[in-house]
Amino acid sequence: MESAHVVFSLGGLHVTRTVVTTWGLMLVFWLCSRLATRRLSVDSPGLVQTALEGAVQAIASAIDGVLPGRSATLLPFVGTLWVFITTANLTGLVPELHSPTGDLSATAALATLVFLSTHWYGIRSAGLKAYARHYLSPNPILLPFHVLGEFSRTIALAVRLFGNMMSLEMAALMVLLLAGFLVPVPVLMLHIVEALVQAYIFGTLALIYIAGGMQSREAAEAGAALASNDPGGRTT
């Protein structure tokens, strides 16, 4: 893939275009954060502060819609994930740049972060024993299927974002090659809409996975309650 083109090497370490673009996005985020938060005010917030507060409140509301009362805990991770993926998806609109999410290695790294954070938040919320116990519910024989499901959904999360963004860039390129530059606006609008949709889907799926991990205690207790009320008279 062109997005995996090696820009330079450090010894035996090859730094690809995807890595350089990601570093550039991180630098832009840092600079924007520093500039946007230099003059925060409670009494007279400026336009930038108002826009930032609105964005944060929108993300917090989306999190509360899935996990009520947990937005303060999940906002740093889920909010950062949404902002980064949205910006990374839109990077492909800049001439000579390619979306990092059009590289499978980048989407695999993002999916791995979601995989690890799901277990991290789940253990913090329910405790190690309760969280591990929910993999044995309602029957220990289902443990291999639970583990397989964890890995399969992580792979699907990475491949879905990569496939959609790569196909979007290829489709836009083909349209431009066939129709010339007479139809740039519809193509750009398609790219923007699809980039926003894919970022929202990825972040929402990540939020749902984390919510499932954080609710593992309730799921385990519900399974135990169902087992204790088995119609056959068996008790736990």
Image: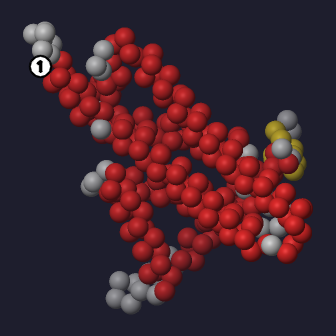
* Mark 1 neighbour class, 10 Å CA radius: few under 14, some 14 to 19, many 20 or more: few
Q: Which residue appears farthest toward the bottom when viewing the image?
A: 44
Kind of residue indicated by mark 1: Asn
- Residue drawn at x 79%, y 72% as measured from the top left: 184
Decide if residue 119 is in sight here: yes
Residue 204, position in %: x, y? 46, 51
The colour scheme of the drawn protein is secondary structure
In the displayed structure image, the side of residue 48 where residue 96 appears, left or right:
right
Identify the image quadrant of residue 222: top left
Decide if residue 10 is in sight here: no
Residue 29, position in %: x, y? 61, 65
**Is 94 above or below relative to 160?**
below
- Residue drawn at x 12%, y 15% as measured from the top left: 231
**Is 128 above or below relative to 124?**
above
- Residue drawn at x 9%, y 10% as measured from the top left: 233
SS at badge 1: loop
Q: Looking at the image, how many numbered discs can be counted on the residues?
A: 1
**Is 163 above or below relative to 55?**
above
In the displayed structure image, the side of residue 111 where residue 101 appears, left or right:
right
Q: Which residue appears farthest toward the front when viewing the image?
A: 179
Identify the image quadrant of residue 1: top right
Residue 113, position in %: x, y? 54, 41
- Residue drawn at x 59%, y 54% as measured from the top left: 198
In the displayed structure image, the side of residue 78 where residue 190 appears, left or right:
right
The C terminus, quarter of image: top left
Residue 154, position in %: x, y? 55, 35
Residue highlighted by disc 1? 229
**Is 169 above or below relative to 31?**
above
Identify the image quadrant of residue 13: top right
